[in-house]
Amino acid sequence: MGDQDQQRHDRDSAANTEDGAEDPGDQADEEVAHRRILRGVEDRLARLRSEPGQAAVLLDVDGTLAPIVARPELAVVPDETRAEVERLAGRYALVACISGRTGEEAARLVGVEGVVYVGVHGLELAPEAAPWREALRPFAEEDWPWLEDKGLSVAFHWREAPDEDGARRTLEAVAERAHSAGLEARWGRKVLELRPPVEADKGTAVQTLLAERGLGRALYAGDDTTDLDAFRGLDGLELALRIAVASAEGPAELREAADLVVASPAELLELLRTL
């Protein structure tokens, strides 16, 4: 069975496991399916770590390495996670953080040398995005208490809004105006992000980073909608592992597309320690 077939097989098994969990009468079948999923993923994890010089470890930052907090500026990557990323950077051909933050901010937050940092969901690797800075300026000047100006995109957070439904309705109107200006509007975990309408995302960033180094094996871990693009960026590789960091706010589609789901950044850290 090829790796792509194996991945589809594992994801089908995951779906079967979830179905079984809803029916106590199928508990035995669920346990068998669960063992099958773990065995398939473990085989690929073993192959990944067997030749680290031929492989990449690619990571989202917020919600993946750093637990989600009320405001982006409050985020912290735990010291033990930082130490693990540093270890991996000395072992694998490529360790990269592909973040919604700017690359400079991601580098400051993670704070590990030897890691490649790509910001604004991959837009920093797309020269064609730069001319759209002017169209984004009026939105960067909006009167919004939790606005994040990233230069190539503008993010409107509403995690701290006293009326989240009302905040979302207000931002839906902002999204409409952005569409009229030719921009894209993307929704994530309590955030609306406005960005240029260019073919650049975390998936294209993944493909560029791997192609530049001639790598055909990679693991990617993320927690939000934009990480689905990164998952797709692994398509066609000799060996691919897609890890979803689950949460109540995270998209169900990410869990469904993943080869393995972990429950938190702390649980992801335990997985990284095995690499």
Image: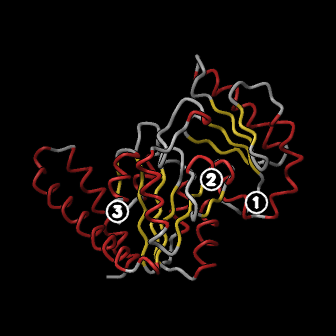
Q: Quadrant of residue 33?
A: bottom left
Which amino acid is tagged 2? Answer: Ala
Is tag 3's residue or tag 2's residue first in the polypeptide sequence? 3
Residue 178's disc is none
In the rendered image, residue 270, in percent from the top left (x then y), is placed at 32, 53
Residue type indicated by callout 1: Val
Q: Is residue 72 left or right of residue 36?
A: right
Q: CA distance from mark 3 to mark 2?
A: 33 Å
Relative to the observer, which residue lies in front, 70 or 167? 70
User: Residue at the spot x=51%, y=75% of the render?
Assistant: 93
Mark nearer the N terminus (3 vs 1): 3
In the rendered structure, which disc, 1 or 2, sits on the residue that comes first in sequence? 2
**Cα distance in 3D space between marks 3 and 1:** 30 Å
**Image quadrant containing the C terminus:** bottom left
Q: Residues within 10 Å of mark 2 (few under 14, many from 20)?
A: many
Could you say where residue 208 lies in the image, as x and y percent from the top left? 64, 72
Mark 3 burial class by Cα count in 10 Å: few <14, some 14-19, many 20+: some
- The quadrant in which the N terminus is found is bottom left
Check disc 2 and report the residue beneath it: 107
Q: Which of these two is toward me, 82 or 239? A: 82
Would you say the residues marked 3 and 1 are in contact, meaning their CB atoms lie under 8 Å apart? Answer: no
Horizontally, is 205 left or right of 137 in the view?
Answer: left
The residue under label 3 is 11
Q: Residue at x 82, y 63 (%)?
A: 128
Q: Find numbered disc 3 in the image and state the secondary structure of the residue it sits on.
A: helix
Mark 1 falls on what kind of element?
A: loop
Name the residue tied to disc 1: 198
Q: Are marks 1 and 2 in contact (CB under 8 Å)?
A: no
Residue 232 point in image, percent of width and height = 53, 65
| Amino acid type, residue under disc 3 in the picture | Arg
Q: Name which quarter of the figure residue 143 lies in.
A: top right
Element class at badge 2: helix
